[in-house]
Amino acid sequence: MSITCIGTGNKEVTLTLEETFDFNCVEKFRTAYEEIDPSTCQKLVIDMRKTHYMDSSALGMLINMQKYWLGRCENIRIVNSNPQIRKIFTISRFDKKFTID
């Protein structure tokens, strides 16, 4: 799985995930968000437009990312998730932890 990291201006950085977001992505995902320069990122966007499957370890990865960025980033948003993944977020109460669009 490849993870694309793009600065989109206004101190916003977008991480775009691929089709599968699961245990096999732990190191790549961690590396992607840890390599972002905090001085260039006030808003972090996780784009799940291409993601069709995620497992419970993906939820853990998102929590770890949130802890890492706590105090460094004003806003973390998850965008473009499909209905099935959005349902997982709702059941897991991630809508209380993240802005989900």
Image (tube, helix red, strand yellow):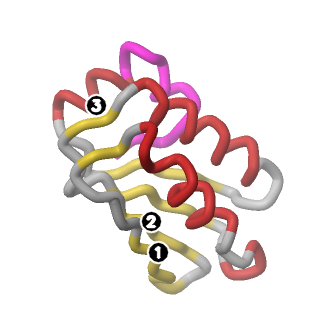
Q: Residue at horizontal 75%, vertical 72%?
A: 38
Residue 92 counted in the magenta span? yes
- Whole-angstrom CA distance, mark 3 to mark 2, is 18 Å
Q: Position of residue 34 (x, y in %)?
A: 69, 64
Q: Position of residue 84 (x, y in %)?
A: 19, 28
Residue 79, compared with residue 7, is above or below; it is above
Relative to 61, 89 lies left or right: left
Which part of the image, by quadrant, shows the N terminus?
A: bottom left
> How many numbered dots are placed on residues in this image?
3
Q: Which mark is residue 5?
A: 1
Residue position for label 3: 86
Lower sequence index among marks 3 and 1: 1
Instruction: Give the magenta-colored segment's residue range.
Output: 90-101
The residue sitting at the right extreme is 71
Q: Residue at horizontal 51%, vertical 60%?
A: 28
Secondary structure found at label 2 = strand
Q: Which mark is residue 15?
A: 2
Relative to 91, 74 lies left or right: right
Q: Residue at horizontal 61%, vertical 64%?
A: 31
**Could you classify mark 3 by the number of other residues whose Cα lies within 10 Å: few (under 14), some (14-19), or many (20 or more)?**
some
